[in-house]
């Protein structure tokens, strides 16, 4: 199966839980924002169908490469045994020595799935799912310049990777993978990933990326170096990416952000559509 097939969005009418919600198109776009090719390695297996979308990547130590994005442990089914199914899925990853992240959305069943994961030793973080019109009047701040990175430019591409890596505690295998993968996805006449580098008074200060989808752009990977925060770099990176989407005729932008980034994104025009929680379950050797 090709990467294009593996990375296709999860259609609302193909997801049993979503279908019951009669999900509006804009909500479907926000929900499916994180589904894309940027985290799929050559050995990534995508398990999809019957309300599920999850990835299994044996080569990846990065938890988000092994993720349950949508699940369907509906305790109301007569044959449902949620705890047994949870344990089987967690064991599938832990037996390979892999950490697992499990997204619990407002509609996820059973309703107490988060508590069940916490009882198994999970840690959690809250994420805001965001939406904005690309017609936003947000402007690039004076003193800040934002360029779309040409992956053929070693200087600009290396600067982007360096700033991105500074924002995350990436293991070596994940950093090497992103260096290869981002160049692949951002190259060619119609790249599906656009990389942006922000400079403050000429000095590299921050970065951000956009995944180009059929009818929206998903903003991800924004980071501003600490010494340049509160100088308009974050706003400028959003403004430049919205402008780029407008130029492509794309009307909507999505983002899934932690609470700190979401606070600023909403200040700059994004609307918080819903929140969800990511639970991380480490194998015993990692969790201690």
Image (spheres, grey):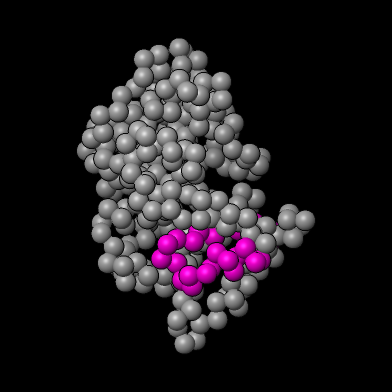
Residue 145 magenta-drawn? no
Is residue 186 among what the camera can see? no
Q: Position of residue 241 (x, y in %)?
A: 34, 32
Residue 142 lies left or right of residue 134; in this view the side is right
Is residue 39 among what the camera can see? yes
- Residue at x 64%, y 59% (from the top left corner): 122
Classify the position of the C terminus by image quarter: bottom right
Determine whether 49 is above or below 26 in the image: below
- Residue at x 66%, y 42% (from the top left corner): 171
Q: Position of residue 9 (x, y in %)?
A: 36, 57
Residue 231 lies left or right of residue 177; in this view the side is left
- Residue at x 46%, y 76% (from the top left corner): 74
Residue 133 lies left or right of residue 107; in this view the side is left
Q: Between residues 210 and 234, which one lies in front from this camera angle?
A: 234
Magenta span of residues: 96-120
Q: Between residues 70 and 156, which one lies in front from this camera angle?
A: 70
Classify the position of the N terminus by image quarter: bottom left
Q: Position of residue 220 (x, y in %)?
A: 44, 40
């Amino acid at each position: 199966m090709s990467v294009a097939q593996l990375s296709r969005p999860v259609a609302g009418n193909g997801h049993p839980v979503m279908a019951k919600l009669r999900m509006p198109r804009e909500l479907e776009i926000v929900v499916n924002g994180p589904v894309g090719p940027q985290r799929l390695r050559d050995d990534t297996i995508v398990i999809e169908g019957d309300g599920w979308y999850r990835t299994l990547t044996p080569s990846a130590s990065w938890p988000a490469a092994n993720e349950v994005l949508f699940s369907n442990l509906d305790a109301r089914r007569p044959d449902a045994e949620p705890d047994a199914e949870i344990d089987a899925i967690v064991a599938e990853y832990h037996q390979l020595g892999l950490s697992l992240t499990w997204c619990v959305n407002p509609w996820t069943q059973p309703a107490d799935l988060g508590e069940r994961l916490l009882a198994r030793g999970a840690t959690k973080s809250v994420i805001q799912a965001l939406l904005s019109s690309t017609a936003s009047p947000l402007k690039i701040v004076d003193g800040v310049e934002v360029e779309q990175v040409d992956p053929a430019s070693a200087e600009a591409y290396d600067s982007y990777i360096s700033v991105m890596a500074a924002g995350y505690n990436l293991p070596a295998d994940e950093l090497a993978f992103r260096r290869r993968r981002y160049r692949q996805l951002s190259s060619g006449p119609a790249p599906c990933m656009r990389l942006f580098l922000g400079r403050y008074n000429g000095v590299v200060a921050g970065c951000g990326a956009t995944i180009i989808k059929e009818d929206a752009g998903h903003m991800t990977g924004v980071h501003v170096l600490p010494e340049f925060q509160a100088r308009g770099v974050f706003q400028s990176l959003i403004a430049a990416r919205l402008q780029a989407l407008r130029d492509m005729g794309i009307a909507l932008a999505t983002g899934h952000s932690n609470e700190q980034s979401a606070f600023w994104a909403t200040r700059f025009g994004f609307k918080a559509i819903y929140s969800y929680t990511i639970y991380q379950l480490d194998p015993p050797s990692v969790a201690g």
